[in-house]
Image (spheres, helix red, strand yellow):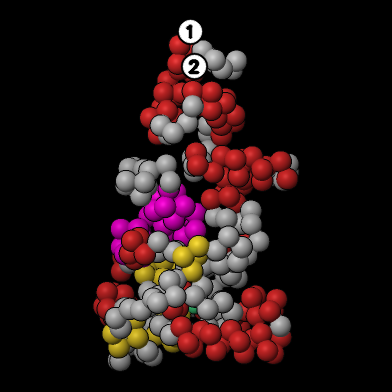
């Protein structure tokens, strides 16, 4: 028996390597905690997106939701939906650059500002310069392929978002406002990395157009992702918005669009994984 783990009643010689692996990752844990963790966490051995750091939250959520699969438990906690919207809000980690998360749990810093470039000739408004250049390239490639893309609603200033949210609150109350609009600081449109293309109403059925089909096949090449996919409302907090695209850079956009993960799931594991603080995510 290993002396290091000898005090733990659950010590299992066969798991020695797992203990050592976890010990290397979490040098702050005692040998007893390491053994306890590995013994419990073995249920999750087949869960690709398991993150050690969230183990207690997985177990708490699992206890409250015995009908959920382990994959659903991991997905829920990784994306914070084990908590009600707008609780435990944190200021988003700006060091993530084009991969920053802005949603109902992550807000922009109060003093956020960005450089902007006009989309004149490509539709309305402004985007952050790299996102703007990428959008223009995408529009031109679309033109060659016979599809017509234009910016309908890109960057929105913080003060405009404050005003817009308040209009909803005044007219319909906060609950309805939270369903239809983002709270100030929580709208992706404030980042300068996001825009609505061609339309922004469900009745237009953008998802039935050649433009949408082309975007699904090509948007990632220009660094954009479909941000609020169909049937993923329970993760993203937004109904399917076939017109809403977010710039994350081509490398991550390709992985996201091809994996079928929401940005929330991708961000948790590949961008913000606390088990891999140096790299920001495991190397594939
Ligand atoms: Zn939008």
Q: Magenta-highlighted stretch: main secondary structure?
A: helix
Q: What x and y, as percent, mark residue 13?
A: 49, 12
Residue name at image x 59 percent, y 29 percent: 40
Locate residue 112: give its quadrant.
bottom left
Q: Residue at x 55, y 89 (%)?
A: 163
Task: Tell me residue 260's x, y (percent).
Answer: 48, 55
**Residue 43 is covered by the magenta coloring:** no
- Judging depth in this view, the residue of 109 and 214 nearest the camera is 109
Where does the image place residue 210, in percent across and percent down from the top left?
44, 76
Image location (x, y in percent) of residue 100: 40, 64
Instruction: Name the residue: 54% across, 15% down.
Output: 7
Q: As rendered, which of 34 and 281 lies closer to the eye?
A: 34
Q: Which mark is residue 5?
A: 2
CA–CA distance in space, label 1 to label 2: 8 Å
As displayed, is residue 104 above or below residue 281? below
Labels in figure, total = 2
Q: Which residues are magenta?
A: 248-273
Residue 225, compared with residue 120, is above or below; it is above
Name the disc covering residue 1, or none. Answer: 1
* Residue at 35%, 86% in the rendered image: 126
Which residue in the rendered view is the most extreme toward the top?
1
Marks 1/2 in contact by CB < 8 Å: the verdict is: yes
The quarter of the picture where residue 11 lies is top right
Name the residue nearer the viewer: 42 or 206. Answer: 42
Residue 210 in view, yes or no: no
Residue 32 in view: yes
């Amino acid at each position: 028996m290993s002396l290091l783990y000898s005090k733990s009643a659950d010590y299992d010689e066969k798991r020695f390597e797992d203990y050592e692996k976890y010990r290397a990752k979490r040098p702050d844990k005692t040998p007893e905690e390491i053994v306890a963790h590995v013994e419990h966490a073995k249920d999750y051995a087949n869960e690709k997106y398991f993150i050690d750091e969230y183990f207690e939250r997985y177990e708490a959520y699992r206890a409250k939701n015995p009908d959920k699969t382990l994959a659903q438990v991991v997905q829920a906690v990784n994306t914070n939906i084990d908590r009600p919207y707008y609780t435990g809000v944190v200021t988003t980690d700006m060091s993530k650059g084009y991969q920053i998360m802005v949603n109902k749990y992550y807000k922009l810093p109060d003093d956020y500002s960005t450089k902007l470039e006009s989309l004149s000739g490509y539709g309305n408004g402004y985007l952050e310069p790299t996102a703007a250049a990428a959008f223009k390239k995408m529009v031109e490639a679309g033109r060659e392929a016979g599809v017509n893309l234009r910016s309908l609603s890109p960057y929105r200033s913080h003060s405009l978002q404050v005003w817009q949210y308040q209009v909803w609150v005044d007219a319909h109350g906060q609950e309805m406002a939270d369903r239809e609009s983002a709270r100030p600081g929580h709208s992706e449109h404030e980042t300068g990395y996001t825009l609505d293309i061609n339309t922004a109403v469900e009745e237009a059925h953008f998802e039935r157009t050649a433009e949408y089909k082309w975007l699904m096949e090509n948007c990632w090449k220009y660094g954009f992702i479909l941000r609020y996919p169909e049937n993923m409302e329970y993760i993203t907090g937004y109904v399917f918005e076939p017109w809403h695209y977010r710039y994350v850079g081509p490398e991550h956009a390709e992985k996201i669009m091809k994996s079928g993960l929401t940005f929330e799931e991708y961000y948790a594991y590949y961008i913000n994984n606390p088990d891999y603080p140096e790299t920001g995510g495991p190397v594939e």
